[in-house]
Amino acid sequence: MLWRTGLQACLGAIALTLCAPAIGETTDVAVKAAFLPRFARYVTWPAGATPKGGDPFVLCVIGSDPFGSMLDQAAASQVIDGRRIIVRRLDSAAGANVCQVAFVDGSRSEPAGQLIAALGHAPVLTVTDAANGGQRGIIHFAVVNGRVRFFIDQQAAAQRGLTISSRLLALALGVKQ
Amino acid sequence: MNARRFSPWMGWRSAPLAIFGIALLILIGGIGVIYQSNAIYARARVEQTQSFADILAASAAAAVDFDDRTAAQQAADAYRVNNQIRMIGIYDREGRLIAGYDRSGTPVPASIARISAAGENEIRVSSPITQAGQHIGIVYLDVDKDVRFRAIARYLVLFGMFLLAALVVATLGLAQTQLRRANRALEDRAEALAESNELLAEQMEERAKAEEQLRQSQKMQALGQLTGGIAHDFNNLLTVIQGSADMLCRPDLAEAKRIRFAQAIVQAATNAASLTSQLLAFARRQPLKPEQIDVNALIREMEDLIARTVGERIRVETELNAESSRIEVDRAQLQSAILNIASNARDAMPAGGVLTISTSSNVREDGTKMVEIGIADTGMGMDPETADRIFEPFFTTKVMGKGTGLGLSQVYGFASQSGGDVRVESNPGKGSKLTLVLPCVETEGAVADGPRVSVASDQPAASILVVEDNEEVGAFAETLLSELGHQVTRASSGEEALDLARARRFDVVLSDVVMPGMGGLKLAQILDREQPELPVVLATGYSQEITESGSGGRPVILKPYRLATLSEALASAMQGART
């Protein structure tokens, strides 16, 4: 549905100007890139899953990367409890155990669902995007009425030992208990 | 006195001052309380507003973080129910407005930079939006400083309380002042009372003193009058006696002249004796010889005598109405008293009139039956001052030499000594009435109807013991008795007489009553025991003892005695002893 809405919007935009869909898409991506480092502020990891000492938070992009430098800029501007946020780009789930947050976009070889499954019950806040298909992580981006919103799967979060702040839950389009 | 007046005055003045002071204190206290409560309220309000902002900052944190303006606006709109909140502005890290509203409808400043300074009537607080140590944005919140009507209500309540307190204090103060004033009035009154009481006591004391002085001076006056009166009368008599005695001493005096001078001396001495007798009667020391007398009969007997005394121009009437008219008094004294009153009545009626002698029965308060002998005239009467003084010895309204001033005092003395009284009623111009009131006797006794029969003067010579401490009187008695042919032995004291009586036998003893050492009465008692057959005749000028206790049945002769009296008494005594 969302995808179709996006398509319709894109088609409408094509009718007006060729560039319009591209600009809208770019803006949504930028918003998503801006959102990604901020989620960590509303999540509590189980003891031992948080970075040791002064180590920074690790934000991973597993599979394809739709954000590019936008994510790096967004991460650089955020601090979580005094820790910096660094971005790592991984091809597979291997080595994802260092990540606190992982945007799982999936790739041709490994779709998102597969990658998430590969993470097992690791205490990683998984983020997926509706634009990439139906596979959902704990947080699932969606664009509604031109605005970037998200769903939250508390059940999945609990499985990974994560607690999500009610303040974030209040913003969600929907919460899966 | 000054201090006393000063202090209530101070109290009177200081009471309103105190009330004013207390009211002022309450006012200051009220203002303080209002100020304090306002400050507390303002602080509480700031704190409350701050907590609103903090809560909003917390609840809107994620919305700001994720640029969810709808959620942020919802969070802000939740505060619209609180109508004290004027404006809410939620700004992001860059100071851009995320959400908010303004109660008045004016748009919320689009950026922090455009926010103007807080107004006078609003409280502005801000609360930073942070999440996990990261500064996300800021919340601005303006509220009304105070709800006006609540403030007014608070002021009104406080003002009411102040008024109430002031009223209470004023009432108390006023009551206190009134009480103090009443107290002061009472104190003043008590003081005035005490003062007037003191004054009264002083006046009473002074009056008592003055009365005492008056009594004393009256006593002295009376004494002077008495002494002067006695001296005057006696001088007159002594002039006659001395002159006559001088004449008698002249040689070659004719027999007729000698007898005349001697008689003049006898007359003067008789008058002197009557004078002293009246004095003693007034002093109530006249030895009385009471006997039972029928008053009505006595007055009938005396009618001629009275008529002769008062003269022809005065008619004498009698109204003898007393039923029981028997009294026991000294006959001679009663006659003398009636004649004294009658002669005074005569003197009160120089132009003539009616003298009424009346008797009536009466009963005294104690139940004693009394006979009243009234002697009334139709003369000039007396004023009350004179009526008060008529019984004083030597008080007289007559010209010098016309009266002794002793007549009515004899009446008074006699009446008192006889257990009765004398009353005076008089109206100037309408006459006077003197009433002798004397007690009746119930028992029938021998009623003497005239003077006793005198004993014959020729009697046998007797042996007589004369006891007299006064040499002259003793010598005189001896001369008299010797002249009568008696054998006289003299003793100058009771003791000596007793010795003589024991040693020798006498026919009769003539003894003076008042003597130093053993008196006549004591001697008589002892002799009665030792020699009951020996009669004793007592002689006295005046004797309190005999007046009080009587002579014990013994004959008493009064000094100055005359030859006839003495011989009669002695003869009678001896005759009694023989029978």
Image (tube, coloured by chain):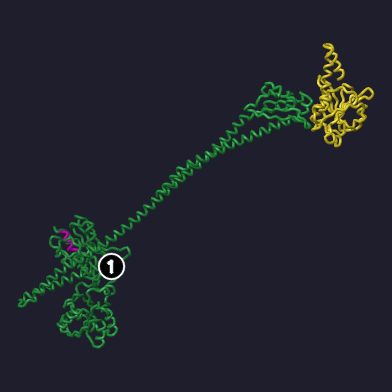
Residue A132 place in picture, x, y as percent: 89, 22
Q: Could you tell whether B88 is left or right of B399 in the image? A: right
A131 is higher (above) or lower (below) than B134:
above
Examine the image and state in which quarter residue B126 appears: top right
Residue B579 drawn in magenta: no
B439 is higher (above) or lower (below) than B99:
below
Q: Could you tell whether B293 is left or right of A135 in the image? A: left
Label 1: few (<14), some (14–19) or many (≥20) C-alpha neighbours in 10 Å:
few
Q: Could you tell whether B205 is left or right of B306 in the image? A: right
Q: Amino acid at mark 1?
A: Gly
| SS assignment at label 1 | loop
Q: Is residue B339 visible?
A: no
Q: Nearer the viewer, residue B571 or B231?
A: B231
Quarter of the image that includes the C terminus of chain A = top right
Subunit bearing disc 1 = B
Residue B391 place in picture, x, y as percent: 23, 63
Residue B434 place in picture, x, y as percent: 22, 61
Q: Identify the chain drawn in yellow.
A: A
Q: Is residue B150 visible?
A: yes
Quarter of the image that includes the N terminus of chain A = top right
Per the picture, the main secondary structure of the magenta-coloured stretch is helix
Q: Identify the chain drawn in green.
A: B
Residue B401 place in picture, x, y as percent: 14, 64
Examine the image and state in which quarter residue B145 appears: top right
As drawn, the residue found furthest toward the bottom would be B503
Give the magenta-colored segment's residue range. Answer: B341-349
B454 is higher (above) or lower (below) than A51:
below
Examine the image and state in which quarter residue B416 appears: bottom left
Question: Which residue is labeled 1 in the image?
Answer: B419
